[in-house]
Amino acid sequence: VRKEGGTDAIGDIMLQHLPQLTCYVRFCGRQSAATQLLTQRINSVPELAQLVRHCEQQTSSGKLMGLIQYFVKPMQRITRYPLLIEKLLKATLESHPDRGSLQEALDEAKKLCQTVNESVRETENSGRLEWCQEHVICEGLSEKLVFNSQTNCLGQRRLVHWGTLFKHKGGKELVVFLFNDFLLLTVPVFNTQGRPFVFPSLALDGNAASASEDDQLANSQKQKYRMYKRPIILNDLMTVPEPDRDSGAEPPLLCIRVLPNEDWVFRCQSAQDRDRWKDRLTKTAKEYHNATGE
């Protein structure tokens, strides 16, 4: 309903302002790193912690909100725009002159969300590759393995999947990293205390949260992983069916064939874990094969 002096069209306004939000693409991509850095500083510098608490309490609305929560606001707002515009479209008649502008604004809002999500994924991937460079020891290779670099045929290297597996015979604990061009098996050179491998992450609760025990374990400079086997190019491996066993037998096994005829059998944490590994290995190897044409 148009009020006097107002308008019942908003699509053109959205189209005018959405391009201005692209400045937040890099902001959202760096949000996690900024949050982690601020948290570390708050935990290590008492004066900064006191200043942050003071600023958080100085609000005219009376609603307390942690400084870190402001870091996530742009992402929250940007991801809401497509939902809001979709609601407007549902309430707009097909014959309304604003219909076309709203549809165009919806397309632009979705593209913006996609760009932001890609920026976040690229930043997370880069951070994990740098973590590997610092924590994974790769000795005996003819050339230094630079994790955060370009592949021969797939552009930027990506870390696709990771986790703890155990050799079926002997039960040796391995931490395995699947990249978009090779598979890397490593062994922890410290006592994992029976914890499965996880990458460090930072939970956002709006306060100066400290890292969890898992994060501390993963971040510690003493927590190193040594290369167990030379990196296996994805064209040289494939998943194969489990050995014949009783139906429902435990534990779930993941079977990998390294061409031409070397079979590796791993014990997984669960059937879901095994299925995830099989799915990621199969899809990633297929993408690599298609890219190389081999």
Image (spheres, helix red, strand yellow):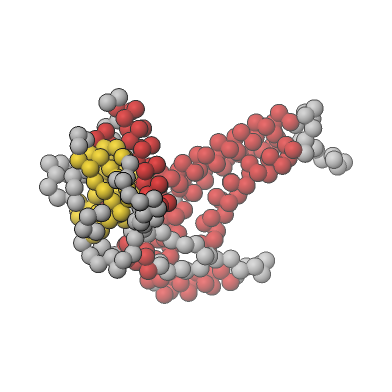
Q: Residue at x 36, y 54 (%)?
A: 249
Compare residues 247 and 72 and report the one nearer the observer: 247
Whole-percent x and y of residue 194? 31, 66
Residue 146 appears in the rendering: no
Look at the image and tell me in which quarter the C terminus lies.
top left
Whole-percent x and y of residue 83? 65, 44
Q: Residue at x 21, y 61 (%)?
A: 189
Position of 4 with respect to 220 (left or right) is right
Look at the image and tell me in which quarter the N terminus lies.
top right
Compare residues 3 and 241 and report the one nearer the observer: 241
Vertical placement of residue 98 versus 269, above or below: above
Whole-percent x and y of residue 236? 24, 35
Number of numbered discs present? Answer: 0
Vertical placement of residue 217 versus 141, above or below: below
Residue projecting furthest to the front: 246
Compare residues 135 and 171 and report the one nearer the observer: 171
Position of 140 with respect to 203 (left or right) is left
Residue 290 appears in the rendering: yes
Quadrant assignment, res 99: top right
Position of 120 with respect to 90 (left or right) is left
Quadrant assignment, res 17: top right
Q: Residue at x 84, y 39 (%)?
A: 2
Whole-percent x and y of residue 258? 23, 39
Position of 75 with respect to 184 (left or right) is right
Residue projecting furthest to the right: 4
